Amino acid sequence: MKYWPLLALLLSPFVNAITLDELQQRFTGQPLIRAHFTQTRTIKDLPQPLRSQGDMLIARDKGLLWDQKAPFPMMLMLDDSRMVQIINGQPPQVITAQNNPQMFQFNHLLRALFQADRAVLEQNFRIDFHDQGEGRWTLKLTPVTTPLDKIFRSIDLAGQHYLESIRLNDKQGDLTDIAFSGHQLTPATLTDDEQQRFAAH
């Protein structure tokens, strides 16, 4: 019997290990998430990285709102049928699957990343998922479909209870790092302003 505590100690990390399916279930149980983002783009021909920040909202039944505050205002709305981008108060640009299928495919993929949608990810990537212990995880995605394999070397995600970081490693040698913080699950429904943003244009 004296071996039981040691055995329990050795087995406990595996008992608590998180899988990709569990991660998807965890994210699916979060119908609405708001977070702050900081994005850093490191472009090999530029001496200084490009930084931006703002707020993000992902609603499982609606889509994604990307509200950049600095260095200039840019609002991006993505749902199942279109992507709307408004830069500095200019007239909105609307992208649909019909008028720009490649761009729409990439942006549709963004939602799959935020929601750890295993089916969509497995269609487009080779998946390397690792449990880091204490509920932390990393997910490395290597594109296997065109045009993604022509654009990215890999997409790396990491987090714990929420998605905390994304790294886009592109074929030109540039890096985009996005860090998320201040995650909020409440209010659990969209505000009037958020509803209007999804409904606009």
Image: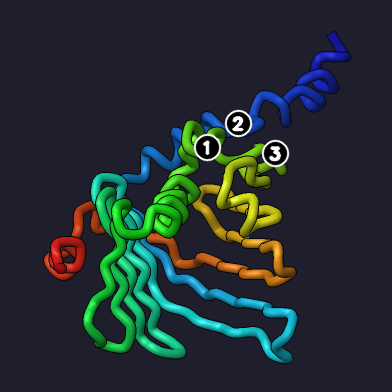
Kindly identify the residue that appears in the image at 68 percent across and 53 percent down.
Answer: 154
What type is the residue that disc 2 sits on?
Thr
Nearer the observer, disc 2 or disc 3? 3
| Residue appearing at x 30%, y 63% in the figure | 95
Q: Position of residue 122 (x, y in %)?
A: 56, 34
Secondary structure state at the residue bearing disc 3: strand
- Which residue has dot 1 on it? 23
Marks 3 and 1, Cα distance to the nearest angstrom? Answer: 14 Å
The answer to whether the residues at label 2 and label 3 have Cβ atoms under 8 Å apart is no
Q: Secondary structure at mark 2?
A: loop
Residue 109, percent from left and from top: 46, 49
Residue drawn where x is 36% and y is 45% of the image: 30
Q: Do the numbered discs 3 and 1 sit on residues whose CB atoms are within 8 Å? A: no
Q: Would residue 182 be found to the left or right of residue 45 on screen?
A: left
Left or right: 30 in relation to 124: left
The answer to whether 198 is drawn above or below residue 16 in the figure is below
Q: Position of residue 13 (x, y in %)?
A: 73, 31
Q: Amino acid at mark 3?
A: Asp
Q: Nearer the viewer, residue 57 or 29?
A: 57
Say whether residue 5 is visible. Answer: yes
Crowd class of label 3 (few under 14; some 14 to 19; many from 20; radius 10 Å): few
**Colouring method of the image:** rainbow
Circles 1 and 2 in contact, beta carbons < 8 Å: yes
Image location of residue 32, percent across then percent down? 31, 52
> Disc 2 designates what residue?
19
Mark linked to residue 128: 3
Residue at 19% x, 58% y: name it: 190
Which part of the image, by quadrant, shows the N terminus? top right
In the rendered image, the vertical position of residue 14 relative to residue 67, given as above or below = above
Q: Nearer the viewer, residue 43 or 130?
A: 43
